[in-house]
Image (spheres, rainbow, N blue to C red):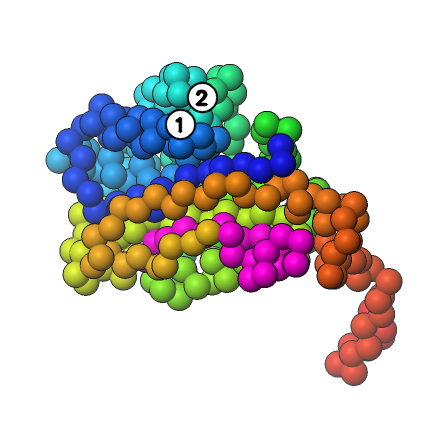
Amino acid sequence: MEHVSIDLWAANLESSVQDLQTWLAALEARVAQTAARGGHMLVLPEFACAQWLNFAPADMAEADTLGWLFECGQISLDAIAIISANYGVSILAGTIPFAAGPVDGIATYFNRAWLITPDGARHSQDKLSLTPLEAQGAGGITVHGESINVIEWNGLRIAMIICLDSEFTDLWSRLGTLDLDLVIIPAKTDMITGYNRVFGCARARAIELQTVVCVLGAVGVPFGAALTDSGVGGASVFTPCDIGVSLDGIHAAIAPQTAAMMTDHVLVAVDIPVGACRRLRNGHAEAEVCPARWDAGHLIVNDPASPKLVA
């Protein structure tokens, strides 16, 4: 593909949802809009499934939250696959807890992103690093993933990186060797500082890897008080900052959205230039600079604090 069009839904987690069928109907309406615009994919943020907690059993223990979301996810993924097939639109359904197997007799869960395509394929990516809340077992026991999954989608090489994972340089150094056309980051950040870290890293890596990075964050928290909640969402599509692609490296963006704004926006990113980025990255087009193909392996580090030179 030379260009791709993607809708990024900065879903408001404070929206009231009556039941799973109502949630799926709202998703289908969004997918229909994406299809009508000629879009190829609709992306939801990390833990968009938290909206389901509106109809969770009133007596559900907090420790059972991830297990209950996992059970709802098994039902919803089948329905989402049907929606994707009916409209010819791929759906990145945010993240949903997925059973990882018991540890010492206790159920554990991955924080797993799902990309469902019209041909029925289901691609997944587990979050690789945990936030303090996840590590402390909030809502159940979350475990981290162990692999990076490269997905072939419409002739493009893509990867999904979940929220906090986007902040780690060593991970991006691995991604930089994979010739990726598109990196998608579903996120949920609790404060503007987290938003700035995730979105700032995404913009830098688009320049560094000479590829397209789409990043999307949810707005608010379930059962929140919109006027005081600090959860900030938004959406951006970043590209290399090069005269052949973009003067500022921002293909499309909406400003940070606080819970107090009570927004539920979709960023419509049309004609994202994945082909032009691919040619820059692989040396098939003249680029101002070529960071994606530079290797620091030949450097010697001279450090007086080290007992010897580190190669």
Q: Is residue 262 visible?
A: yes
- Is 129 placed above or below 288 here? above
N-terminal label among 2 and 1? 1
Which percent across, then down, holds residue 311?
Answer: 85, 66
**Residue 112 in the figure: left or right of residue 20:** right
Residue designated by label 2: 88
- Are the residues flagged by discs 2 and 1 in contact, CB closer than 8 Å? yes
Rendered-image quadrant of the N terminus = top right
Q: What residue type is labelled 2?
A: Gly
Residue in view at x 65 percent, y 40 percent: 275
Residue in view at x 74 percent, y 61 percent: 289
Which percent across, then down, holds residue 17?
Answer: 18, 35
Residue designated by label 1: 35
**Residue 151 in the figure: left or right of residue 254:** right
Q: How crowded is mark 1: few (under 14 residues within 10 Å), some or many (20 or more)?
A: some
Q: Residues within 10 Å of mark 2 (few under 14, many from 20)?
A: many
Tell me the distance, in whole angstroms, between the alpha carbons under discs 2 and 1: 7 Å
Which percent across, then down, holds residue 228?
Answer: 19, 62
